[in-house]
Image (tube, helix red, strand yellow):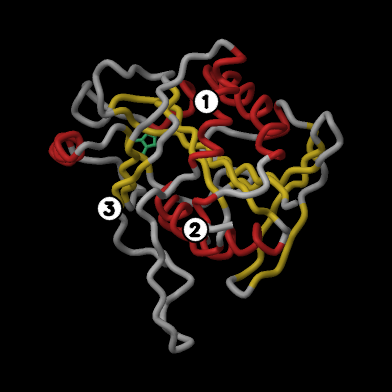
Amino acid sequence: MGKIALIAGTGFDGSEIFQTDEEMTIETAYGEVNYVPVSMPDGTEIILLMRHGKDHHIPPHAIPYRANMMALQQLGVDKAIGVNAVGGLRRNQHPGTIVLCDQFLDFTKARPFTFFDGDDGRVVHTDISFPFCEELRTCLLQAAAKEGILVVPYGTYVCTEGPRFETAAEIQMFDRLGGDVVGMTAATEAVLLRELGICFANISLITNYGAGLLDHLAHQEVESIFAANKEKVLKIIARAIPDMQMIQHSPCCGR
Ligand code: HPA
């Protein structure tokens, strides 16, 4: 059976709860990737990948998404959990709310977003109707219930190009289109992981109201709300991992 990866973003350093080993590097056809093997209490190993780099120096539009996802495949990963700090589009979902997204709307525009770019003369269209893995989402949901942590079980993640935040008009548009939260990375990762046949679940933590819903928006606010609520996210993940390890086949990736 394959390994589980945790793809962590803003405000996250896995060493806070997991016992992390030395950072390692793996070479892929798309460049080098750093990752940290993490030993779980039961002795299994998971792979921690910090999408913005260890010291948060890579902005969302410049993340080497293809190298990162290819690295996970080379490391034997078959399931991944993506943790995202996001803006909230619903006034009744306050900062600190956790949403387990099951859909996305992709508004990225200038980043490599596929492994099937036609260079090898092949045309491949991947089914992404349901971009996140239902089995993994259920594990997260059950883990949250066991930990007594309230989560929103479904949500649509709007993925923007960044690194700027949105305009108030964009936030209103995303709301009307059915978006629930807005971030800058999850859709790209979901597409690439699906192309590689790796199951993916999302755990989004609302760190701020979307632009225009309140008066201003600052990156410090995102970091401090994440820090204040990160414990809940980590508890859910730690609880869910043993159950995820039991899943052998998942229809989402045709495995
Ligand atoms: N917009 C986009 N990405 C984000 C936000 C936001 O409001 N908050 C955290 N990541």
Left or right side of 191 for 172 = left
Distance between mark 3 and mark 1 Cα atoms: 27 Å
Distance between mark 2 and mark 1 Cα atoms: 21 Å
Name the residue that disc number 2 marks: 194
Secondary structure beneath label 1: helix
Residue at 72% over, 49% down: 3
Task: Indicate the position of residue 56 as horizontal and vertical percent values.
Answer: 56, 44
Q: Is residue 220 above or below residue 94?
A: below
Q: From the viewer's perspective, is the residue at label 3 or at label 1 nearer?
A: 1
Name the residue that disc number 1 marks: 141
Q: Is residue 125 above or below residue 34?
A: below
Secondary structure beneath label 2: helix
Task: Give the residue type that dot 3 points to.
Answer: Phe
Which tag, 3 or 1, sits closer to the chain's start?
Answer: 3
Q: Nearer the viewer, residue 33 or 6?
A: 6
Q: From the viewer's perspective, is the residue at label 2 or at label 3 nearer?
A: 2
Name the residue that disc number 3 marks: 107
Which tag, 2 or 3, sits closer to the chain's start?
Answer: 3
- Is ligand 1 less than 8 Å from the beta carbon at label 1? no
